[in-house]
Amino acid sequence: STPISAGDLTPGDALLKNSGGTNHVALFVRWAGNGRPLVWEEYTSGRPAEERTRESLRGYTPVRYRPAQGEADGDGTS
C-alpha cells in the first residue's frame, strides 16, 4: 500500500492506525459531512464489522492498495 492524502481518499482505501503496538484498520466508505469519515470496521474484537462514522482521521494514515507488478488488479487482467 502507498500513503495518500486525506483529500485523495476514495471508497475502498484503508485507514491505518498504529498506537503503541496496537494496530487497527478501517476501510473508507465516504465522507459523512463535516470532515467525518464513514468507515467499515471491526470496532470491537470478535464482533462483525459494521459501518461507523469516525469523528476525524486523527491518528490514522490513509493508504491505497497498489498491486505488485504482474499481480491481478481486480478486473481479471494482470
Image (spheres, grey):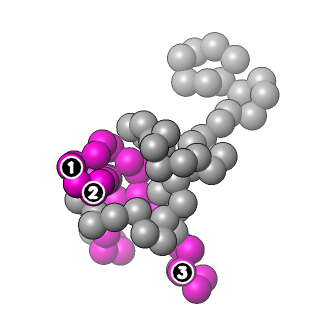
Give coordinates of residue 31: x percent, y percent: 28, 46
Q: Are marks 1 and 3 in contact (CB under 8 Å)?
A: no
* Kind of residue at disc 1: Gly
Instruction: Give the residue at x 57% y 15%.
Output: 76
Q: Are marks 1 and 2 in contact (CB under 8 Å)?
A: yes
Q: 8 and 46: which one is in front? A: 8
Q: Which residue was labeled with disc 3?
A: 19
Chain part drawn in magenta: 18-46
Give coordinates of residue 61: x percent, y percent: 54, 60
Instruction: Give the residue at x 75% y 34%.
Output: 68
> Around disc 3, counting alpha carbons within 10 Å, would you say few (fewer than 14), some (14 to 19), or many (20 or more)?
few
- The relative height of residue 31 versus residue 72 in the rendered view (above or below) is below
* Kind of residue at disc 2: Arg
* Kind of residue at disc 3: Ser
Please name which of the two marks, 1 or 3, marks the residue nearer to the observer. 1
- The relative height of residue 20 versus residue 78 in the rendered view (above or below) is below
Q: Are marks 3 and 2 in contact (CB under 8 Å)?
A: no
SS at badge 2: loop
Instruction: Give the residue at x 72% y 27%.
Output: 71
Left or right: 14, with 70 as reference point: left
Give coordinates of residue 56: x percent, y percent: 34, 64
Q: Which residue was labeled with disc 2?
A: 36
| Magenta span contains residue 44 | yes
> Around disc 1, counting alpha carbons within 10 Å, would you say few (fewer than 14), some (14 to 19), or many (20 or more)?
few
Q: Which residue was labeled with disc 1?
A: 33
